[in-house]
Amino acid sequence: MMKVMVKNTHIEHPEDSILNGDLSVLNWFTADSHISVKIDGSPAIVWGTNPANNKFFVGTKSVFNKKLIKINHNHTDIDRNHQGKVADILHLCLDNLPDTVNIYQGDFLGTGGTNSFNPNTIRYDFPDKVHQEIVIAPHTYYIADKDLRDAVAYPLQFNLESDDDVLFVQPEVTISDERDSIIERCQFARQIATLCEFASDKQLPRIKKQLNTCIREDVELDDITLEALAIDNNIDVNVLRLWQLVRSIKWDMFPLIERDAEIECYINDEECDHEGYVMSNEFGTFKIVDRDIFSKHNFLKVRD
């Protein structure tokens, strides 16, 4: 049975999930899974039928806000709730997305008339010029009873049909079932876990932020660095060694993944792979991303 996701505001890196002692990711690595390409689009678009009034809407992740809810049923709503580029994109989405009784989320790639799209860090080059008005990469669908704030997210495991107005981009991707080496490394990780005194939930935000800063700034995460981080955060260094091990298991997953090469990816005119992949199974949903490459580039883009 597929484990549901929470609202799709953030999908965790597998290595980060073990810091507080949750070892379910070690089962996640080897379970039968659904995998999809993580497209580097912006902004995230949510659209569908609002269960509160049965009206079609478009919006960003702010449709799920608990207080300042920004659901747009018409162009007047968009002008009131948003501004600038995001408002322009939502106007296009309201005009071009097909009416549906469902609720979907996807990443906006751009507008038609070209074969090249650079919404964020990665530039995507398609084999042919896109004739549709907008291009979106859908990845999630929601089920909500009476209110969007109570919506439950599921990975999208079927393709949405493109039409004359919108091109839905869902590259084909598969992952090999031959994971004997992954299984062995996960068994070793469980042994290491028996030596760990895990971080508390209160400690998690700070240590995650420091680890991410080290990755973004190309700090070598050797044992000296890990010991310094452990002392600074008053946590067991073995937890960080386990984090490093799980991170390396994630890297071992990349050669097992095969994807459709029809769309070419570039960063600063240098060819690259997709940003990563999202894999879901009964043990959770996590992203398989080479943080050493993409976290650094995203950080530099923000600074620029």
Image (cartoon, grey):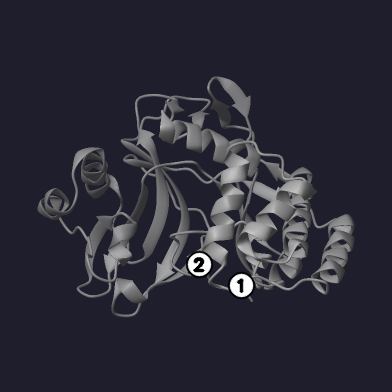
Q: Residue furthest top?
A: 269
Residue 233 position within the rendered picture, expressed as x and y whole percent measured from the top left: 62, 61
Task: Name the N-terminal-most of marks 1 and 2.
Answer: 1
Residue 154, labelled with which disc?
2
Residue 7 position within the rendered picture, expressed as x and y whole percent measured from the top left: 43, 67
Q: Is residue 86 left or right of residue 10?
A: left
Q: Are marks 1 and 2 in contact (CB under 8 Å)?
A: yes
Which residue is located at x 66 percent, y 72 percent? 283
Mark 1 — residue?
A: 2
Q: Is residue 42 left or right of residue 187?
A: left
| Residue 172 in the image: above or below residue 105 | above
Q: Quadrant of residue 240?
A: bottom right
Residue 143 position within the rendered picture, expressed as x and y whole percent measured from the top left: 41, 73
Considering the numbered disc 1 on the image, is that residue within a helix, a strand or a loop? loop
Which residue is located at x 54 percent, y 59 percent? 206
Residue 46 position within the rendered picture, expressed as x and y whole percent measured from the top left: 34, 56
Query: Looking at the image, can residue 3 be seen?
Result: yes
Amino acid type, mark 2: Tyr
